């Protein structure tokens, strides 16, 4: 699905040229970009470049929701007497996502491994990915809770983007990374440049990331009990995470009698009844077992299950650190694990 | 599986009958291409059954494909979906999504003695194993079935016991926790029955399905009796929503019950079973 990498032709454009370009793109596809929504920065649809918020670190929620929405319809169900009709509702919307940060791009690549590469392909997610073009924006420096460099990322990593933008003084370097990205570039209007993006200011990794194969040995460490004592099972960490993808599927009634929809909604492995089975038996009944599962999923289970190799499913975006009401900090857990190893 | 793995096949209920207290057998005739998808399904596989408008839930397929072209499911009325299914009648339409998961390695079992242990409705996914062995009786050694339930009214497939007993080189042993006045079989847990029957581990494999706590103790006892972990097979139940290795819910450590299982041997999952209880 992802087009082969180009030799990354690069153009230098001004802020005004960038805004004019985005305005013209917004006329051809839905443009989704960082936008101030009542004081909260979110990736949201914009009508034109004036609605875009510039000079941000990263939005409060990741770009995940545009490919794997918090609630989406999978099927419409119509019942008439003993007849049942199922209508598939595959997404059609053509989109451009602008301003996607490297951590969020890595989040999408992590979800690609699950929803696209791990058979069978999920038709809803993969359709949205096919219908989207991603214009990424490299970070010049890392935010206060960012730790991408500790989990193998970098603030200026352009992997997976269709077009990568780098801020350079008052201008932008624009690199086409894929054929799909190249189609967006008004090549006759812009001038190519030999300028190479200056490296971003990178914070040193917080620790040496625990090796993937060291995780099983710490499964019964007392640390998990200690860490989970204050966890509220509120699930906010999963909802803000660019790679948490647990979901439920359920049927809901529509207002017309006999009509229903089968929907898929986000869930989280830290929630109390996550593993409750018919009859009331609850596996992972203890908070520490559930919180531990989330950490193990990020750094051991998910990479093993979906072939991420040595890469973790944590992108280091730091949103869970920002959002946790009781200050559970994933980086503290990693430092502790590295210390135990 | 259909092009869209989230879209079920439609199926018509051709028979609904009581199997035990609150447990019904649903026999489904698949429509719109579903019968081709399921015609080669293997003992141990499962499927999601939809009560449209209320949702879907996973169930072990309770018949061998050679006993088709129908699919049988034994369903206990416990939650929203199973209650809705219990309210359906012959002729009603349900959804079936699958077949999903791995299967019992019936070819590898050839020439071996089989000890089959079913607890309550856990007997349902073992029925296709029993049917397969009886249909191909000469391919397998001794078949020892240990069947347990909390009380006699919860035993499943009772009308088939005669056929099982009549098959050569096959024995059936029953036990319940709480007998009624007419009960003339063993009383006690399935582990007590297993000690009494005392099957030889020589050239034998065991296959267990039941509540997690039963699986745990049965596996421990079989190991004490000399059954090697790789010869003790279990089929596990876990809450799941997709059955495709996506929704994340059914993991047992780094394994996913839906796609790496539901059939495992104890060498694969013995060390993880504690997190399953």
Image (cartoon, coloured by chain):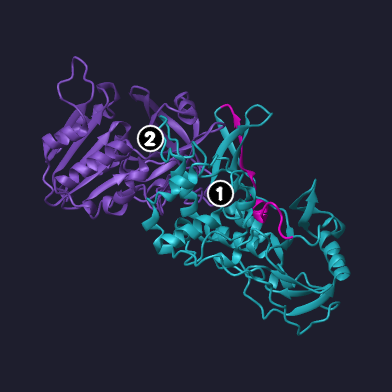
Chain colours: A cyan, B purple
Q: Which mark is residue B73?
A: 2
Position of A81 with respect to B74 (left or right) is right
Q: Which mark is residue A328?
A: 1
Q: Is residue B98 visible?
A: no
**Residues indicated by labels 2 and 1 sit on the same polypeptide chain:** no
Q: Position of residue B69 (x, y in %)?
A: 37, 41
Residue A65 is inside the magenta segment? yes
**Mark 2 belongs to chain:** B
Position of A114 with respect to B207 (left or right) is right
The residue most toward the top is: B181
Q: Which element type, helix, strand or loop, lies under badge 2? A: strand
On screen, A190 above or below A115?
below
On screen, A23 above or below B141?
below
Which quadrant: the C terminus of chain B? top left
Count up the numbered dots. 2
Provide the residue span drawn in magenta: A57-81
């Amino acid at each position: 699905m992802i087009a082969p990498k180009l030799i990354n032709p690069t153009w230098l454009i001004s802020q005004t040229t960038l805004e004019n370009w985005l305005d013209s793109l917004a006329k051809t596809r839905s443009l989704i970009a960082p936008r101030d929504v009542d004081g909260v920065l979110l990736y949201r649809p914009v009508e034109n470049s004036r609605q875009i918020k510039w000079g941000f670190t990263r939005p409060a929620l990741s770009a995940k929701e545009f490919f794997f929405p918090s609630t989406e319809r999978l099927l419409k169900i119509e019942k008439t007497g003993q007849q049942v009709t199922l209508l598939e509702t595959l997404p059609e919307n053509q989109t451009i996502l602008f301003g996607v940060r490297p951590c969020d791009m890595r989040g999408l690549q992590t979800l690609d491994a699950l929803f696209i590469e791990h058979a069978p392909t999920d038709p809803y997610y993969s359709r949205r990915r096919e219908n989207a073009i991603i214009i990424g924006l490299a970070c010049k420096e890392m935010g206060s809770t960012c730790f991408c460099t500790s989990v193998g990322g970098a603030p200026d990593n352009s992997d997976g983007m269709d077009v990568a933008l780098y801020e350079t003084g008052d201008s932008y370097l624009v690199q086409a990374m894929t054929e799909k990205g190249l189609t967006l570039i008004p090549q006759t209007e812009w001038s190519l440049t030999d300028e190479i993006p200056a490296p971003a200011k990178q914070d040193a990794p917080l620790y040496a990331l625990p090796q993937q194969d060291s995780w099983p040995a710490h499964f019964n460490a007392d640390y998990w009990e200690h860490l989970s004592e204050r966890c509220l099972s509120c699930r906010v960490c999963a909802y803000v995470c660019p790679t948490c993808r647990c979901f439920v599927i359920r049927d809901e009634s529509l207002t017309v009698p006999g009509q229903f929809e089968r929907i898929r909604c986000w869930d989280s492995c830290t929630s109390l009844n996550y593993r409750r089975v018919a009859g009331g038996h609850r596996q992972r009944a203890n908070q520490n077992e559930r919180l531990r599962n989330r950490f193990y999923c990020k750094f051991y289970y998910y990479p093993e299950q979906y072939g991420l190799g040595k890469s973790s499913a944590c992108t280091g975006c730091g949103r869970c650190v920002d959002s946790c009401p009781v200050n559970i900090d994933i980086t503290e857990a990693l430092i502790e694990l590295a210390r135990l190893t | 599986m259909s092009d869209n793995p989230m879209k079920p096949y439609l199926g018509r209920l051709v028979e609904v009958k009581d199997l035990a207290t609150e447990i019904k057998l649903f026999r489904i005739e698949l429509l719109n291409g579903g019968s081709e998808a399921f015609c080669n399904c293997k003992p141990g596989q499962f499927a999601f059954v939809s009560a449209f408008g209320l949702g879907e839930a996973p169930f072990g397929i309770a018949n061998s494909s050679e006993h088709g072209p129908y699919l049988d499911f034994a369903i206990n009325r416990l939650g929203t979906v199973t209650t809705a299914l219990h309210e359906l009648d012959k002729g009603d339409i349900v959804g079936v999504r699958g077949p999903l998961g791995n299967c019992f390695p019936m070819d590898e079992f050839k020439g071996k003695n089989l000890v089959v242990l079913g607890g309550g409705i856990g007997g349902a996914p073992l029925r296709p194993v029993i049917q397969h062995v009886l249909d191909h009786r000469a391919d397998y050694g001794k078949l020892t079935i240990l069947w347990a339930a909390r009380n006699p009214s919860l035993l499943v497939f009772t009308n088939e016991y005669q056929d099982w007993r009549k098959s050569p080189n096959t024995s059936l042993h029953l036990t319940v926790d709480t007998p009624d006045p007419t009960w003339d079989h063993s009383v006690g847990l399935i582990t007590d029955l297993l000690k009494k029957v005392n099957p030889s581990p020589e050239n034998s494999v065991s296959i267990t399905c039941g509540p997690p706590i039963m699986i745990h103790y049965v596996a421990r006892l079989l190991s004490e009796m000399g059954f090697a972990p790789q010869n003790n097979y279990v089929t596990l139940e876990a809450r799941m929503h997709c059955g495709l290795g996506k929704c994340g819910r059914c993991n047992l450590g780094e394994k996913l019950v839906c796609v790496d299982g539901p059939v495992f041997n104890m060498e694969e999952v013995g060390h993880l079973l504690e997190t399953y209880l």
